[in-house]
Image (cartoon, coloured by chain):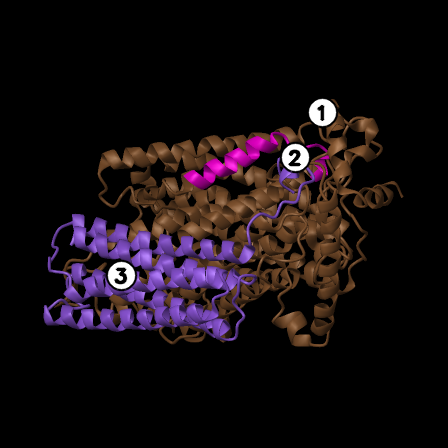
Chain colours: A purple, B brown
């Protein structure tokens, strides 16, 4: 197969698993969505009339939780590759719980914002924080849905060293959502 | 060698499993014709939805042309259809006029020329021309259509609201669109517009992701990127444009939804309405324009590129000549794709933008003339001294080239940030984009329908009716849009209900021309009924299509005349050559399909192609069968 790949024709053309590739394209569209929001943020901020405030402290802790969940996700992938089913079930369940915990913490982060008198309706500097964290949260919910399918599959032993596509897609999406939040959080810390 | 045979087996086993799947499908009407995952059925669903929308959108333009061409006309006879939108004096309601203009734009740009064009032909041609059994994900593809359908239904329902559909122009600039008090159409109609467009964006993204994934991953053996038909290249670039720009429109729409429904101030600032100060502080309406046009400009190419790609294919086939400058065509489409993202602010020259920034955008905008000219010259040089066969598809393709050039030339004028100050939002702009984007893409759509109808329905469309349709449409489009340039230069602004204060008594001076445009529009629109009749009649009663009616080279004509789900019976053909071997010196016929190996065409091979023959031996077992089918 390798030797014929460089021949112009008639080599087999398929290269990537279409499902994983589809996930990457989906990720590209999400990147564009948030790129638009963050550039809108910068453009709007440059025009002045911008209220500054501290980020809620809970956002830092929730970031830690999300990173931890990503590590657990990676651990589940490794376990799946080695057919260690108990470790897989354990780590993928922890990932799911940490994901839920992150969402709860984000919600309490919003409550902290309200206590600081930063509301969704008001100066756009505050509204943007709600929109960015809220839409990220919405995407995280979709991530949890993907995760729960993988979780059920893991408990039914449908994920193993020979069937890795599902957990790979799940892990890719989950790590992306983690990275997306890191980007948004750092962006907000720098630009607020 | 061994990999090739094992692959062949793989294909066979795949076929069997597929056949079983298909038997299940046939049991059920719903899964075969309605909730189908077959790309061909989904393409037809898109096409028929697109045609229905085109008639709705077109009829709107006729109603507002009546107002513009004959301001004194009594429109009582329209009351059975429009009801209260015709006021007591027999006049078109002013608010409804704005709604008509808005909905005409929205429907034509998104529902007809995006979904109806790209949705139809990307779905239909990508798997058939690259040699795949279906899209990467048939299920996502089906979801894509049904999200579009849901979006269509919401938009259609909004037409019947008492306050009317969205009326702030298809670009829905805030604050007009953000404040329900601003105009009747900014109420529920606007909410439904935004809801509908959100579903539309989701549908487009699902479709686009599928197209890209399919083109990259599911090509048949031998179908390298440089052997792909230009149609596939154009669909690929279109999908990339959509994937990168539609999310940005979604973000613009979401912020607008928050402003409208939750009271945030992303786009609103220091506004008084009916004497009342609004609480909104600190928003920026220009921000919306930036976000909108970051989609809005690529959208022009999302609409146009598929038409250009299909035209390349049709012109080469019907000129019986290889396309001139195949790689230059790919390069120019790539250039257009990249430039599409860095020219958006030329829609915003008069927003008080920094003049230096305006010059940068002007410069970038004018660069688009280069790849566009490359394409135009390549079409003309392909036609030059070809054995032209004037099928209706060919006529529409040549029509596209004509419209693309005459509409493109005015683009150079409008792209100029100084000239644009005078011409902005006049009928000159209307004339420009209707020729270069609206009519050109529409001609591409029509060319595609006439050309691939036999593959879609296994029957031929009536040629004579096709010719009549073409000449009415071609002459009609020019009669409608050419005079608009003069009206624009005279200073008539677009989207106005009536012209009571145009300088130098302009309104009176141009009454005849406006009436002329309206009559031409009515004739052109009426002529589309010929097409509708031809289309729907031929689906059921048309002449049966032969295997390869246009003697074309691409893979879709090697599939059965009425392909089942899975497209090819048995193996998918392998590809050995580019798709433009027309009138090759020394060949027996004036076309050599892509699946014919060089070893079967010794008499016409070029020296470098002889070297390719050795590599063809890699696919033992396939060669014999394909030689046989060609020589038979």
Query: Same subunit under labels 3 and 1?
Result: no
Looking at this view, is A81 or B69 the one in front? A81
| Figure quadrant of residue B570 | bottom right
Q: Residue at x 66, y 70 (%)?
A: B33
Chain identity of mark 1 = B
Looking at this view, is B206 or A172 the one in front? A172
Residue A69 placement (x, y as % from top left): 33, 64
Q: What SS does tag 2 mark? A: loop
Q: What SS does tag 3 mark? A: helix
Residue B388 placement (x, y as % from top left): 73, 35
Kindly identify which numbered label has been placed on residue B608.
Answer: 1
Give the Cα separation between the discs numbered 1 and 2.
Answer: 14 Å
Kindly identify which numbered label has been placed on residue A7.
Answer: 2
Identify the residue under disc 3: A132
Query: Same subunit under labels 1 and 2?
Result: no
Which residue extends farthest top?
B607
Give the Cα separation between the discs numbered 2 and 3.
Answer: 48 Å
Is residue B319 inside the magenta stretch?
Answer: yes
Q: Residue at x 80, y 57 (%)?
A: B543
Q: What SS does tag 1 mark? A: helix
Which contiguous range is marked in magenta?
A: B317-338
Q: Residue at x 21, y 69 (%)?
A: B263
């Amino acid at each position: 197969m390798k030797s014929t790949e460089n021949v112009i024709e008639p080599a087999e053309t398929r290269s990537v698993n279409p499902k994983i590739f589809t996930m990457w394209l989906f990720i590209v569209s999400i990147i564009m969505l948030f790129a638009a929001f963050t550039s809108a943020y910068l453009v709007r901020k440059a025009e002045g009339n911008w209220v500054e405030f501290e980020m809620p402290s809970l956002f830092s802790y929730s970031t830690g939780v999300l990173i931890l969940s990503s590590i657990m996700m990676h651990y589940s992938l490794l376990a799946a590759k080695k057919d260690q089913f108990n470790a897989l079930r354990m780590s993928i369940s922890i990932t799911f719980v940490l994901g839920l915990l992150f969402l709860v913490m984000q919600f309490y982060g919003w409550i902290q914002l309200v206590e600081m008198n930063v509301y969704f309706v008001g100066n756009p500097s505050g509204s943007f924080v709600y929109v960015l964290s809220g839409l990220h949260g919405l995407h995280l919910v979709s991530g949890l849905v993907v995760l729960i399918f993988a979780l059920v599959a893991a408990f039914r032993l449908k994920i193993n060293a020979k069937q890795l596509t599902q957990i790979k897609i799940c892990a890719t999406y989950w790590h992306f959502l983690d990275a997306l939040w890191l980007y948004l959080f750092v962006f907000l810390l720098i630009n607020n | 060698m061994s990999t090739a045979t094992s692959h062949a087996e793989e294909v066979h086993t795949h076929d069997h499993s597929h056949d079983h799947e298909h038997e299940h499908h046939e049991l059920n009407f719903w899964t075969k014709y309605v909730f189908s995952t077959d790309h061909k059925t989904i393409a037809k669903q898109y096409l028929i939805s697109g045609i229905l929308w085109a008639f709705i959108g077109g009829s709107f333009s006729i109603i507002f042309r009546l107002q513009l061409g004959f301001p004194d006309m009594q429109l009582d006879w329209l009351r059975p259809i429009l009801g209260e939108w015709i006021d007591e004096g027999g006049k078109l309601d002013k608010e409804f006029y704005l709604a008509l203009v808005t909905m005409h734009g929205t429907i034509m740009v998104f529902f007809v020329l995006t979904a109806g064009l790209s949705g139809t032909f990307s779905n239909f041609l990508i798997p058939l021309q690259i040699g795949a059994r279906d899209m990467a994900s048939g299920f996502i593809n089906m979801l894509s259509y049904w999200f579009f359908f849901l979006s269509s239904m919401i938009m259609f329902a909004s037409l019947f609201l008492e306050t009317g559909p969205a009326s702030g122009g298809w670009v829905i600039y805030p604050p007009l669109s953000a404040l329900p008090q601003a105009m009747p159409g900014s109420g529920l109609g606007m909410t439904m517009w935004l809801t509908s467009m959100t579903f539309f964006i989701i549908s487009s993204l699902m479709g686009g992701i599928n197209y890209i994934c399919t083109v990259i991953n599911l090509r048949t053996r031998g179908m390298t990127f440089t052997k792909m038909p230009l149609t596939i290249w154009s669909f690929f670039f279109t999908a990339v444009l959509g994937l990168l720009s539609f999310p940005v429109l979604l973000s613009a729409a979401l912020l607008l939804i928050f402003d409208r429904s939750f009271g945030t101030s992303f786009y609103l600032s220091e506004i008084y309405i009916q004497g009342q100060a609004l609480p909104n502080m600190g928003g920026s309406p220009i921000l919306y324009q930036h976000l909108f046009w970051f989609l809005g400009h690529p959208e022009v190419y999302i609409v146009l590129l598929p038409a250009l790609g299909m035209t390349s294919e049709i012109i080469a086939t019907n000129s019986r000549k290889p396309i001139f400058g195949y790689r230059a065509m790919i390069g120019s489409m790539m250039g257009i794709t990249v430039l599409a993202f860095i020219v958006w602010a030329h829609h915003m020259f008069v927003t008080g933008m920094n003049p230096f920034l305006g010059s940068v955008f002007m410069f970038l905008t004018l660069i688009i003339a280069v790849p566009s000219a490359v394409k135009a010259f390549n079409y003309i040089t392909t036609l030059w001294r070809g054995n032209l066969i004037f099928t209706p598809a060919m006529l529409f393709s040549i029509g596209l080239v004509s419209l693309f050039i005459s509409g493109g030339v005015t683009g150079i004028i409008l792209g100029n940030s100084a000239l644009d100050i005078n011409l902005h939002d006049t009928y000159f702009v209307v004339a420009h984009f209707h020729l270069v984007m609206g009519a050109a893409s529409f001609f591409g759509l029509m060319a595609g329908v006439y050309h691939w109808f036999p593959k879609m329905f296994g029957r031929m469309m009536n040629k004579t009716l096709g010719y009549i349709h073409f000449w009415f449409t071609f002459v009609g489009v020019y009669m409608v849009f050419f005079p608009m340039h003069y009206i624009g230069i005279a200073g008539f602004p677009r989207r106005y209900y009536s012209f009571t204060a145009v300088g130098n008594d302009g309104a009176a001076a141009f009454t005849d021309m406006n009436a002329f445009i309206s009559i031409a529009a009515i004739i052109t629109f009426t002529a589309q009924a010929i097409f509708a009749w031809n289309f729907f009649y031929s689906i059921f009663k048309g002449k049966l299509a032969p295997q390869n009616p246009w003697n074309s080279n691409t893979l879709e004509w090697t599939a059965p005349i009425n392909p089942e789900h899975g497209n090819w019976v048995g193996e998918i053909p392998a590809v050995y050559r580019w798709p433009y071997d027309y009138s090759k010196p020394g060949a027996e016929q004036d076309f050599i399909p892509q699946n014919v190996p060089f070893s079967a065409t010794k008499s016409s091979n070029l020296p470098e192609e002889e070297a390719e023959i050795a590599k063809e031996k890699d696919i033992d077992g396939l060669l014999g069968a394909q030689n046989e089918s060609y020589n038979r």
